[in-house]
Image (cartoon, grey):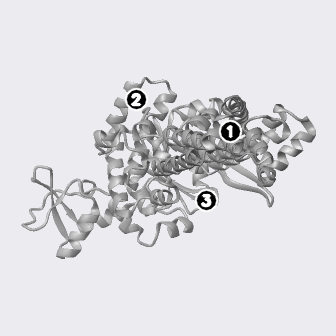
Amino acid sequence: MLRTLSISMVPQRSLVPYVVLGAIALSIVWGLVASGMWNDMLRYRKDVVYLTKQHLVLVGVSGSLAIVSGVALGVWLSRPWMRRYAEATIQVVNMGTAIPTLGKLALIMTVLGIGALSAIVGLWIATLLPIIRNTYVGIRAVPHHLVDAAQGMGMSPTTILRRVELPNAMFVIFAGVRTAMAINVGTAPIAFLIGGGGLGELIFTGIDLQEFGMMLAGAIPTALLAVAVDFVFGQAQYWLVPRGVNPLRAS
Amino acid sequence: MIRLDALTKVYHTSHGDVASVSNVTLEVPEGATCVLLGPSGCGKTTTLRMINRLVTPTSGRITIAGRDTGSVDPVALRRTIGYVIQQIGLFPNMTVAQNIGVVPRLLGWDAARTRKRAEELLAMLALDPGEFLDRYPSELSGGQAQRVGVARALAADPPVLLMDEPFGAVDPVNREVIQDEFLRMQKALRKTVLFVSHDIDEAVKMADCIAIFRAGKLEQFAPPDELLGRPANDFVRGFVGSDRTLKRLRRIAVSEVMGAPNGAGAGPTVSTTDDLRRVATLFLEHGVDALPCVDESGRVVGTVTRAAVATRLGAR
C-alpha cells in the first residue's frame, strides 16, 4: 500500500517533459530565425563561449562543494550525539532558506567584497541549505527498527550509515540535491551583479541596453544549462538509488 | 547454554530510578527454546536486548556457553547471535539474498558461499530460491518476509537465536503455519532460542521452558506443563487463564499416558504421537472412556483412558 502511495506522490519517470521542452525550444529558435534576432545573437558568439565557461565554473565549483559539504553536514546532524542540537540547527537552516538568494549574495558581498569568490561562496550557501535539510530529514525518516535490526546483527555504526541509513535515505537526499541544483543554476546569472561574471553579464547588460539579441544570447544557454543539469541529476536519482527503495523504479 | 545472573536494568528518569528488569536469574539449557512471557512493559524485551547488549545491564552477568558477554566486543558478540524482531526489519534497499547475506558478509565470507547459504536457507523455509533470492522486501507478503527474517538470523549458523515477538505481525492462520515450520526446523537445528511473546498459547506451543515476567521481576520459570499445572502465584494463575488445563493437553503426548491394550473394539483411534487435545475431543464427541492407540504402522499398541488422563493432569 505504501508503495502505491509513493507512486502517486512521485511523478513517473518519463521522457515526455523533455520532448515538450524540445518542441518549445524548436519553436523559439524558429521564431528567432524568422525575426532576424538569431543573427543579432550570433554576433555575441565569442562572448557566449567565454562567459559560458565562467558560468560553468561558478555552477560546478559551488554545486559540487555544496553537495559534498551538505551531505556531510546532514549526516553529522543526524548522528545520535547531535540529537540535542539538530532540530534547532535545522530551524536555522530553514530560516536561511527563506532569505531570498539575492539578499544572501548581497550579504556575502559586504563580507567578502566583489568578485568570483563571493559569487561562489554565495551560490554554495544557497545550494547547501536544501541538501543539509533533505539529508538530515531523509536519514531521520529511516525506520528505527531497521537501525535496530542492523545493530542487533552486529553492524558497526559506520556500516549502518553506509549500508542501511544512506541507501534508504538516498531518494530524499537526491530530491534535495535536485532542488538545490535548480536553485544554483537559477541563481548563477545573478552572480554577475557582485562581480562573479558568467552568462548574467549578457542578460543584465542586454536588459540595460535594451539589446534583446544580447540578452537572449545569455538567457538561452542559461536555460539549456538548467534543463541539462536537471536531466543529469534526474538520471542519477533513477540509477543510483537502489531499486528496492526507488519509487521511480518500483515494479 | 545461556545463564542470566541477577540481571538488573535501571533507567534514570525524571521521576526517579525505574527498574525495568530487576534481579532476574535463569538458565536456558543448550538447544532449548525459552519463551519470555508477560504483559507489555514487564521487562521481557529489555531482558532479551541485554543478551546481545543492545541494552547494557546496570548490574548482573550474562554468560553464553560459559563466556561472560560483558567481556566481549558487543559488535563481534552480535554476529554470533541471531536476531529476529517483530517488525522483521528486512533492509528494503537490499534483495532477499543480500539481506540474508548481511552477517556472512560482515564475517568476510566470499560471495559464492554467501549465495549458496541463502539458497539453502530459503529452501529450508519453504521458499523457492529461484523465485525469491532476487526479490526486494517490498515484493514479499508478510509471512514470506518473516521467513526471510528468520533465514537472515540463521545465516551464519549462530548457536543462539533471540526472537522478539517474531510472529506477532503475521495473521493468525499464517502464524500457526510459521510456528509449525519453526518447530520442525528447531527440532533439526537445536539452537538455543530466547523468544519474547505476550501470547500464552504461542508460549505453550513453542517453549521448552517459560519465564513469566511482571514489572521487571521473574514470577515463575518452568516448563509449560508445570507452569500450567502448578502456577506459582495468583499473577501467573491469572495470566495463564482459567482454561489452563485445556492448554496443558497440547503438550502431553498420548504415549505419556498410554496403558496396556485392553482389546477395545472398533471405532476411533489415536496415534501415540498425538497430543491429548485429540484424545479429549474424541472422548467428548463419541462419549467413550477409552481409546485404542496405534503406532505409525496402524498396529494397536495400547489404550488411553479417562482415568489415566486425569491421573496425569492431577499428578503434578
Assign a secondary structure to mark 2: helix
Name the mark on residue B114. 2
Q: Residues within 10 Å of mark 1 (few under 14, many from 20)?
A: many
Foreground: disc 3 or disc 2: 2
Q: Which residue is mark 3?
A: B42
Decide which of A246, A40 is in the foreground and name it.
A40
Q: Amino acid at mark 3?
A: Cys
Q: Work out whether disc 1 and disc 3 sit on a shared chain.
A: no
Chain holding disc 3:
B
Q: Work out whether disc 2 and disc 1 sit on a shared chain.
A: no
Q: Amino acid at mark 1?
A: Val
Q: Which residue is mark 1?
A: A71
Q: Residue furthest left?
A: B266
Q: Residues within 10 Å of mark 3 (few under 14, many from 20)?
A: many
Decide which of A124, B79 is in the foreground and name it.
A124
Q: Is residue B12 left or right of residue B78?
A: right
Q: Work out whether disc 3 and disc 2 sit on a shared chain.
A: yes
Decide which of A173, B293 is in the foreground and name it.
A173
